[in-house]
Amino acid sequence: MKELYKICTVLICLLFSISITGQEDRIDSKIDNWRYWKERAEMGIIPFNSDDPVKPANYVGDQNRMMDGPDVVLISGGTTTQSENSVFVDPNNNQTALVSNNSTLGSSVQGTNALFSFDGGATWTGGTGGAGGNNSGDPATAISLGGTSYIGHIAPGFKQGVSISNDNGATWSVSSVTTIAGLLDKNHLWVDNSNTSSFQGNVYSAWTNFGGTNNNQIEISRSTNNGVTWSTPLNISGAVSAGSHNQGVNIQTGPNGEVYVVWAIYDSWPSRENALGFSMSTDGGVTFSAATRIFNNIQGVRWQPGFPIANPHGKNMRSNSFPGMAADISGGPNNGTIYVTWSNVGVPGINTGTDVSIYMMSSTDGGLTWSTPSKVNTDPAGNVQYFPWITCDPVNGNLSVIFYDDRNVGATDVEAWVADSTDGGLSWSDFRVSDVSFTPAPIPGLAGGYMGDYLGISANGGNVYPVWTDNRSGTVLAYTSPYTLAGCVNNLVITADVPSGSSDDQEALNTITASNTVLSGGQAVYHAGDEVLLVDDFDALNGSVFRAYIEACTGVFTPFTDGAITRASKPRLNQYYKEDTSTKMLQIYPNPTHGTFQIGLLDDELSDFDIEIYSTSRGLMYANSFSQKGVASFQVDISNFPDGVYIVKLITSNTQEIYTGKIIKNR
């Protein structure tokens, strides 16, 4: 029976391949946009994905849990599906994050939705519809230092657009990036958030043009006015002379506003990726360098049903090796380094065997030269890892990569994993981030074996938000499980001024050397294990708040002014609780709790105060201000918190008295 199944599968794939070959004037198999393939299925050119029941997921969350908490589904209910994830952490508040997915509702393609979390990923708000109106998907999210949220997408007619919000997703407007001829596919979007960039706030969008004037080439456009208008697109990939096409573009920006662009090269078709292309700009995207092949001998994992080449990963979903990229703008020891990741069959340059792993190479000179590719996942050869996405924390320079992994499961199953590096990719530690293993299966009602083309991950200030898709519920949905990745550089040089209204909190294991200015209304706290050197023209102007002290990395930054503690209105999420024996005790009941509990004082009525709740392992998880005049107690709900022991801290606004207590949360 099993052999009969295999024969039938081969015949179906062969017939599908013949169908594609016979319809070359009606379908371009290089394109992987989900709406494109769904429309071809509606035309009868290819079959729809089957609606067979998926294999039940296997829960493994309580087995050897390491760093993360329970998985959180971003949106569910009804007939929605959420695939293909892009996530971005607010650079001004690492408790806020934006996620966009390819969203469907029943048989209708909604496009790139918008989901926000304002509590560190514990809960999410948003809907299934496309942000600012339905579109053709392929989300790419970003949030600027100025607070503008962006979601790049394929606009109706397979053009390029971007959804823009200035109020954390309450309202959206839609800007047309370009309406040039062609089918504009597989886009990416990025915003320059470097404090040392002359082009801070510039937004960049890039894609592959299929069928237009720049057929099979990467095009890029920029906006200098928050996405309202866009420049004429530039063809930046022509110099690599791809034998077939260029696809899977990724954009990043460097400390001084350098624009880096990487993509996959196909020298034949149908085939897998065989090289990586790269181009850069040093003038804010006005001009770009001639494209180069930064690695000319890779073996990617491109596959979809009907391909005349073997499936390299054995999973029942289409795949690719579009590269991910990150650039370090932290000001730390690896400042300016560029990192590129992809999934490769065998060792890059040799490209043989059955092992499929994540590889990374880096450049410390703006992309002129690159390191030898090194393996990211730490398991022995022989397993499968694919769909990597990489992020570099803009505060501490730590690296995190998310990917699908089958090291612990059967040949048809995968889990979501992440790998972290605190030394610029010299060494990695990885762990399973998902609480389930599952069997990938194409989304019913779509076509071409589609279950999403990429995962997402973003970090800021030590908080890491991995986002992936799985079908544990029987429906394809997006999940996250945020975690804290502490890290501290050895030595730090600070040159960027701190403007009015901004806060600059920095730490180093050994030495901080500062030559900047803290302007009136600005706030800066620097601490290092050995010394803080204030050199050259360092100045803290009248009306600023500045403190420097000797202490190794803690993640806690307490500013002082005139000897009195000044508490920040939005504490950093990765702060850790430090016990203070002078504090008074809180009344907390019931204790333990399943989620809801009461807080009261032993000897005072509550007035204006702040509440902070700390995990003993993950740091600050909640902070808020309250006014409860004349009330002796009030209620707090931590139902969404993982089980564990938490420290509750209350600080009165008028007297700055501190009260603490412990609460145990369990099911």
Image (cartoon, rainbow, N blue to C red):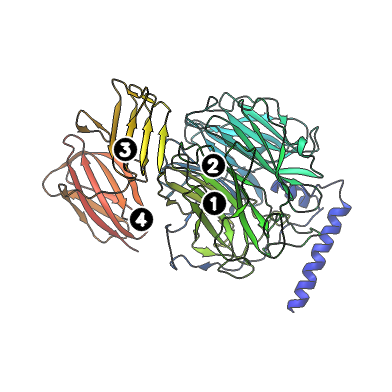
Instruction: Identify the residue at image location x=48%, y=35%.
Output: 170
Q: Can residue 144 be seen in this view?
A: yes
Q: Separation of disc 1 and disc 3 at Cα?
A: 33 Å
- In this rendering, the label closer to the viewer, 4 or 1: 1
Query: Which circle's residue, 2 or 1, is located before the other in the chain?
Result: 2
Q: Mark 4 points at which residue?
A: 639
Identify residue type, mark 4: Ser
| Place of residue 93 in the rendered image (x, y in percent of width and height, measured from the top left) | 41, 38
Q: Mark 1 points at which residue?
A: 401
Query: Which circle's residue, 2 or 3, is located before the other in the chain?
Result: 2
Farthest residue, direction left:
603
Q: Mark 2 points at which residue?
A: 114
State if disc 3 and disc 2 touch (CB < 8 Å). Answer: no
Query: Which circle's residue, 3 or 4, is located before the other in the chain?
Result: 3
Q: Separation of disc 2 and disc 1 at Cα?
A: 23 Å
Query: Which circle's residue, 1 or 3, is located before the other in the chain?
Result: 1
